[in-house]
Image: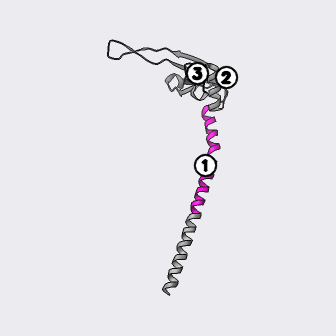
Amino acid sequence: MEFTRIIIRPLHTEKTYTFGALPAKKYAFEVDPKATKHDVAIAFESIYGIHPTKISTQIRKPAKVRTGTLKPGFSKLTKIAYVTLPVGADIAASNKDATKNTTPAKKEETKKETTKKEVVKKEVVKKEVAKAEVTTKEVK
C-alpha cells in the first residue's frame, strides 16, 4: 500500500476540536479502511515529520441512508485514525518551520528573476538610446 494514499483527509468536527485543549495534542484523520496503525504512523511521520506516540482507530460501518425509494441506500465504510502527538509537539508549528525554510529560497528566486528583468530592460534602453543618437546625428 502506498503511504501517500493512506491518509485521505483530516476530520474537523466538534469532537476533534476538543482534542486541541489537551496537553498531548490529538488529531483525527480519515484513512484507508485497509490501513493498519503501523501504516498510519509511517504515513503521518512522512507527511508531518513528527513521530506519533499513540494511534487509535475506529471503523464506521455503513449506515442506512434514505433514498426515497423502497430500497435503502448505504453510506460508505470509513476508518478514522486518532493520532496522539508527544507533549509539546504540534502540527501547525512543524508546518510553519517548513514554510520558513522554503520562503527564503522563493525570495531569492524572485530576486534573480527581477534582476534578469532589470538587465533586459537596461539593454533595451541602451539600444533605444543608441538608435536615438543615430537619428539625431543623421538630422544634424
Q: Nearer the viewer, mark 1 or mark 3?
A: 1
Amino acid under label 2?
Thr
| Residue found 54% across the figure and 27% down from its top | 8
Query: Do tag 2 and tag 3 residues touch (Cβ < 8 Å)?
Result: no
101 inside magenta stretch: yes
Q: Which mark is residue 53?
A: 2
| Rendering quarter of residue 19 | top right
Q: Residue at x 36, y 16 (%)?
A: 66
Disc 1 residue type (three-letter)? Lys
Identity of the amino acid at label 3?
A: Tyr
Q: Position of residue 94 (x, y in %)?
A: 63, 35
Q: Residue furthest left?
A: 69
Q: Specify whether 69 is left or right of 27.
A: left
Query: Magenta residues?
Result: 91-118
Res 3 quadrant in image: top right
Choose between 18 and 64: the one closer to the eye: 64
What number is the disc on residue 82? 3
Look at the picture and state if 84 lies above or below 126: above
Quarter holding the N terminus is top right
Against 70, residue 137 (above or below) is below
The residue located at (35%, 12%) in the rendering is 71
Residue 25: x percent and y percent? 61, 26
Q: Position of residue 102 (x, y in %)?
A: 63, 44
Alpha carbons under labels 1 and 3: distance apart: 35 Å
